Amino acid sequence: MSFRQARWDEPSIWDLAPSDPGPVPEVPGVPERLRRKEGLRWPELSELEVVRHYTRLSQMNFGIDTSPYALGSCTMKYNPKVSEQLARRPGAADLHPYQPVETVQGALEVVWRLERILAKVTGLPEVSLQPAAGAHGEYAALLMVRAYFRDRGELAQRTEVLLPDTAHGTNPASASMAGFTTREIPSKDGCVDLAALRAAVSDRTACFMLTNPNTAGLFESEILEIAATVHGAGGMLYYDGANLNAILGITHPGRMGFDVAHLNLHKTFATPHGGGGPGAGVLAAGETLAPYLPVPRVVKRGRAFSLDYDRPKSIGKIRAGYGSFGLDLRAYAFAITHGEEGLKHVSRRAVLNSNYLGSRMGRYLPRPFRPLVKHEFLLSGAPLKEKGVRTLDLAKRLLDEGVHAPTIYFPSLVEESLMFELPETESKRELDRYYAAFERAVTDTPEHLHAAPRNLAVSRIDEVRAAREPLLSWKDLRAASAKVETP
Ligand SMILES: *Cc1c(COP(=O)(O)O)cnc(C)c1O
């Protein structure tokens, strides 16, 4: 037997051979200034180092699989794992959007069936699953409104989109992008001020965009008068149904008089929020605007499904492919697993959750407007200002408790607002855990509140710098951490 000393540079199965960056390849036609100056340096890492890197990154993140995620309006629902498994089956995941339709009959049937379900849910007969997100759906719907007024010869005159001050920020953005000017309608006691709306509508009104229940969690009970007012002036009524959690199977935008709506499958129908990846907005239209929906439409003739491009009034195609099919499949699974009664239960539970938690938290902070709300509720952090504490501090302190903060400073009609939504997938036990976290946070000392979060991978970040100079590669991270460690 012979022994010799172990050496670090001896190859082991865990080490990769050092990669040689080599020369920069000559690519004809690529100008000198765009060419890299040196060969590609791949990180040479063992499997263990790669696993640790990604596991560490995943632990720096917050997800619905870890704890309640109370971000109001955003509806952070649990995404059932069975839906994930379904979407990852090769028959779904490996489809190509431009496969011949004869080979994707099953997929088209799922789209068609989901469209039928959503037509029932919205009370609007024609549905398209094409938009990639809520904002994309809004934008497409406003293009439909433009096309409608162009057909009527009123486009030059109807330039204004009206919005309540509780509107989601994407509404005015979409309206501006679609070429309209926007005008804000004030609220009274958290709902649209009908007198102000009556005074604002005119032959310039193209559309009124409304969420109901609104982002203050309140049902706009004057909705039929609102609809009559807008229609009376010749305008269209747009339903922002990104979050439909309060009314599934109970009422619908069709009954309220809306002409067109968008829904977010990634909110109400428990499909993942893309994290920048694909979402799934859905457009639903009543008879007036249905001819303008984007092409292609999925149609059923006999037993065969096909893509119909023959819609002369359509605004055309709004994205590559047909839609986010993986999300459609998950949403379809969610809808048929619940069934019609089950979907009603989703809404009842969401409303119960929000009222239960709202009334308990109301011991500490005022609840604006009314004591009874729908799927989400507001608190005002204004009284904390006496202690020098802001809503931002309370939100950051909640993160230290291992739960996600509510939406903050929105809607802006409430001072220092906090907007909580705990959807139906949260149990009472989880709500009580969230309440305990809130109680510890709101009663903590100003010093602790200002210093929060102290238990997370990063404390308060420079949000502008994080967006402008993100560290996205392993090498950047390593360089940054080396800098921090150097005394
Ligand atoms: C989330 C949301 C939107 C925007 O949806 P995205 O998919 O994020 O573009 C619009 N309106 C309301 C009320 C929302 O909650």
Image: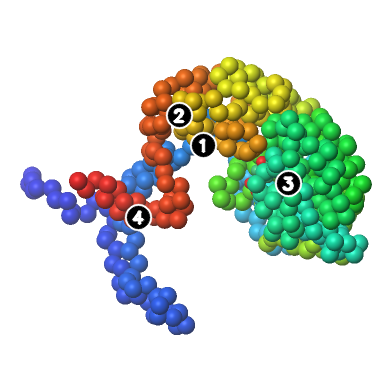
Q: CA distance from mark 2 to mark 4?
A: 37 Å
The N terminus lies in quadrant: top left
- Locate residue 116 relative to residue 353 in the image: left or right: right
Name the amino acid, label 1. Gly
Give the image location of residue 268, x and y in percent: 69, 37
Q: Is residue 476 above or below residue 35?
A: above
Between label 2 and label 1, give the one nearer the viewer: 2
The residue identified by callout 2 is 388
**For the residue marked with disc 3, what is the amino acid?**
Glu
Q: What is the spatial separation of the Cα atoms under label 4 and label 1, in whole angstroms?
A: 24 Å
Mark 4 touching mark 1, by CB under 8 A?
no
Would you name the residue on which mark 1 appears?
Answer: 63
Q: Amino acid at mark 4?
A: Asp
Element type at mark 2: loop
Of pointers 2 and 4, the one earlier in the residue sequence: 2
Indicate which label's residue lies in the foreground, 2 or 4. Answer: 2
Q: Which residue is mark 3?
A: 184
Look at 35% across and 55% down and name the residue there: 476
In this picture, residue 392 sits left or right of residue 109: left
What is the secondary structure assignment of the residue under circle 1? loop
Residue bearing the label numbered 4? 476
Do the residues bearing badges 1 and 3 touch, measured as CB atoms within 8 Å? Answer: no
Q: Amino acid at mark 2?
A: Gly
Specify whether residue 158 is in view: yes
Q: Please give left or right for residue 252 compared with residue 472 in the image.
A: right
Q: Earlier in the sequence, mark 3 or mark 2?
A: 3
Q: Ligand 1 shows up in which quadrant of the image? A: top right
Q: Mark 4 to mark 3: distance in Å?
A: 44 Å
